[in-house]
Amino acid sequence: MTRLGGPSVVVVEDADELGRVGADLVADELRRTPGAWVSVATGETPMGMYAELAARRRSGLLDTGGLTPVQLDEYLGLEPDDRRTFFGWMRRSFLEPLGIADERVVRLPLDGDLAAACAAFDRTLDARGGLDLAILGIGTNGHLGFNEPPVDPGAPTREVGLSTATIDANARYWGDVNDVPTRAVTTGMRQLLAARAIVMVVSGPTKREIVHRALEEPVTPQVPASFLQETGAAVTVIVDREAWGEGDPS
Ligand code: PGA
């Protein structure tokens, strides 16, 4: 289903279809741009898509040899070998299955002068013309990466404090809400919105309200994902029936 002049919304019936449709889009992008720089979300929603991409690679249908993954976001204050880092999750779900060495990842800075290092990260992306593709989820509060509301669409890559909504939502990965880190680094809105293409995956009833606010209500800093309505990027939102509800996108 397509809406002219804004994000294309594809409603899928289940997780398998979400994985297949998402993998089709990413695979098309890699065929068009074999050396693509791709911002890679962790989170539950894109996992089926990454598994599908890995299966295609094993069958010889997908070449990831030129792909440069770019880290989307990361917690601060964890040991580098902590399994709960997003980098560790990215390694297990994306890098290893797709045969990509850790060293190929454009990583976010986690220590030192973070402001200067985040500015250098943005300069690195700018120098090669920005992201070719951003694979994103959406938070229940509308965040993209860890760009928490309210946010400016020009926000740079930076250190952020996590919102209560995000900490509560991520507690399921940590066992106890008090163990969830409260600070993080995120690729900024400016880089994400300037990507040539964006694929956002949305699943489950907890995302229903926010996905409709983001796509159908006026653009607002209170819903970071609403800025997807205004980018020049080719935006595709793949949303399952549980998240979208009945009816078709208009
Ligand atoms: P999820 O995370 O895919 O685990 O729901 C999405 C997000 O918080 O951006």
Image (cartoon, helix red, strand yellow):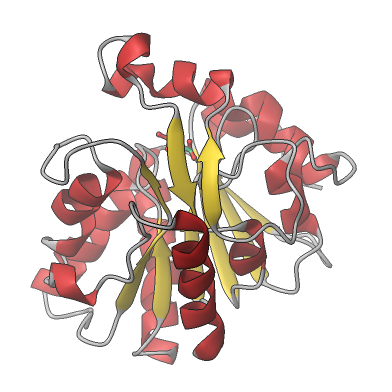
Indicate the quadrant where residue 191 lies: bottom right
Q: Is residue 140 above or below residue 23?
A: above
At a point 70% along the width and 36% down the height, the residue shown is 149
Q: Position of residue 19 (x, y in %)?
A: 35, 51
Q: Position of residue 63 (x, y in %)?
A: 21, 83
Q: Is residue 182 above or below residue 109?
A: above
Q: Quadrant of the N terminus?
A: bottom right
Find ligand 1 in the image and state its quadrant: top left
Q: Is residue 111 above or below residue 55?
A: above
| Left or right of 38, for residue 60 | left
Q: In the depicted view, which residue is nearer to us: 111 or 151? A: 111
- Residue 19 shows in this picture: yes
Q: In the depicted view, which residue is nearer to us: 188 or 199? A: 188
At a point 46% along the width and 71% down the height, the residue shown is 121
Q: Is residue 117 above or below residue 248?
A: below
| Left or right of 50, for residue 140 | right
Q: Position of residue 67 (x, y in %)?
A: 30, 80
Q: In the depicted view, which residue is nearer to us: 78 or 191? A: 78
Indicate the quadrant where residue 68 lies: bottom left
At a point 25% along the width and 64% down the height, the residue shown is 53
How many circles with numbers are drawn on the protein? 0
- Residue 1 shows in this picture: no
**Residue furthest to the front:** 113
Q: In the depicted view, which residue is nearer to us: 212 or 130? A: 130
At a point 32% along the width and 54% down the height, the residue shown is 49
Q: Position of residue 201 (x, y in %)?
A: 50, 48
